[in-house]
Image: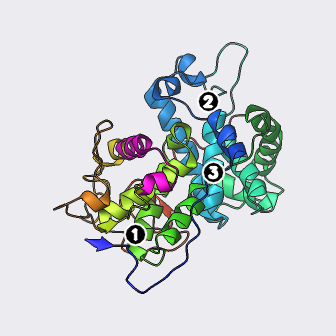
């Protein structure tokens, strides 16, 4: 078992973690739902099956990831776009009905990415964004797109029009705390930010979570803590207590929420077919939701760690879930091509 405890004689001054700002906490509360409330999303209430609704969410986020990679956007911007996309679908339906024609999920995804680039101050030219959207939607990365093509103006007008719709649905609440920075701050606090295996494992967890509805069930701080726990468990790294408090209390995170987040990720990815013969990083991650004891990395004995990602860096992390692998999205494209007129 590897410990993060400071060696005797070494005095490393650490600033204690600060609780999340009250304004951020209050802002996030209105966007946190229960699992039963997710089953009452507008699309489902209009007659769409929960499985189909989840599939469209996943395709929309995949669209964001693919366009973002073409534009070389950082993962934090893509994560923010995924949050905007999921929040929009909690207040708007994708199911057409009499007198109502919904936005296509690719339209919503493209607009969410456009808005996220401005919020995160990673702007790209509208022309570059439109060209990337057309190429991803048509599954043709080499398609010639310019101001003379019909698709260019269709997508440009769609994004500009839909931005107002998206902003109104989000109530102009654009304050997003990406879990990536919080997770990295936690790594630095415990002095393990240079542990590449742990860092990549935690980053992979966050990248996989973008393709789920985790951002609607838990705060970004909880998701960051869950990624740290998953990575520490895989790498057999002990997260020390401080002042008689366990690490999750030091980081101002609820223990039961960490368990639930890890279990939900295990539900989605544990049964996925491993690639290249590698076992899933989510194998053995599940723990009971209730009960006094919690299998923190420090209390585990005899647990075989899963292999960490083979390589990775800030933006392109290889892992065994269904998210990003070597800079590519596993679920490339979908059956939809062009937008409807």
What secondary structure is marked by label 1?
Answer: helix
The answer, for residue 234, to whether it is visible in the render is: yes
Q: Residue at x 51, y 69 (%)?
A: 189
- Relative height, residue 253 to residue 300 (above, below): above
Label of residue 90 in the image: 2
Residue 340 image point, x, y percent:
69, 34
Q: Residue at x 73, y 36 (%)?
A: 170
Left or right placement of residue 24 versus residue 272 in this view: right
Q: Is residue 61 magenta?
A: no
Start-end of magenta stretch: 247-265
Residue 236 image point, x, y percent:
29, 67
Residue 103 figure quarter: top right
Q: Taken as a whole, is the magenta stretch helix, strand or loop?
A: helix
What secondary structure is marked by label 3?
Answer: loop
First in sequence, mark 1 or 2: give its number: 2
Residue 49 or residue 263, whichever sits in front: 263
Whole-angstrom CA distance, mark 3 to mark 2, is: 25 Å
Q: Which residue matches tag 3? A: 20
The answer, for residue 210, to whether it is visible in the render is: no
**Split into 4 quadrants, where in the image is the C terminus?**
top right
First in sequence, mark 3 or 1: give its number: 3
Residue 112 image point, x, y percent:
70, 46
**Split into 4 quadrants, where in the image is the N terminus?**
bottom left
Frontmost of labels 3 and 1 is 3
Q: Which residue matches tag 1? A: 198
Q: Is residue 255 magenta?
A: yes
Q: Residue at x 62, y 28 (%)?
A: 94
First in sequence, mark 3 or 2: give its number: 3
């Amino acid at each position: 078992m590897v410990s993060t405890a400071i060696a005797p004689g070494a005095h490393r001054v650490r600033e204690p973690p600060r609780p999340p700002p009250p304004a951020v906490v209050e802002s996030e509360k209105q966007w946190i739902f229960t699992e039963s409330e997710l089953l009452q999303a507008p699309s489902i209430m209009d007659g769409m099956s929960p499985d189909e609704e989840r599939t469209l969410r996943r395709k929309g986020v995949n669209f964001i990831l693919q366009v973002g990679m073409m534009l070389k956007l950082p993962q934090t911007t893509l994560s923010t776009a995924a949050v905007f996309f999921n929040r929009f679908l909690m207040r708007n339906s994708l199911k057409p009905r009499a007198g109502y024609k919904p936005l296509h999920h690719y339209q919503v995804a493209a607009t969410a990415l456009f808005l996220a680039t401005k919020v995160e101050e990673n702007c790209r030219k509208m022309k570059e964004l439109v060209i990337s959207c057309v190429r991803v939607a048509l599954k043709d990365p080499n398609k010639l797109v310019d101001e003379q093509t019909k698709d260019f103006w269709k997508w440009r007008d769609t994004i500009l029009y839909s931005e107002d719709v998206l902003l109104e649905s989000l109530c102009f609440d654009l304050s997003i705390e990406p879990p990536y920075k919080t997770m990295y701050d936690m790594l630095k606090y415990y002095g393990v930010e240079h542990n590449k295996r742990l860092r990549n494992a935690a980053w992979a967890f966050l990248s996989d979570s973008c393709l789920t509805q985790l951002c609607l069930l838990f705060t970004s701080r909880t998701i960051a803590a869950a990624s740290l726990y998953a990575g520490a468990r895989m790498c057999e790294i002990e997260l020390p207590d401080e002042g008689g408090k366990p690490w999750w209390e030091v980081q101002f995170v609820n223990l039961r929420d960490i368990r639930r987040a890890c279990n939900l990720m295990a539900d989605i990815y544990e049964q996925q077919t491993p690639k290249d013969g590698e076992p899933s990083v989510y194998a053995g991650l599940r723990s009971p939701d209730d009960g006094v004891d919690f299998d923190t990395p420090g209390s585990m004995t005899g647990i075989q760690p899963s292999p960490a990602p083979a390589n990775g860096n800030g933006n392109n992390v290889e892992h065994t879930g269904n998210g990003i692998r070597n800079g590519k999205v596993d679920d490339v494209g979908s059956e939809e091509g062009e937008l409807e007129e």
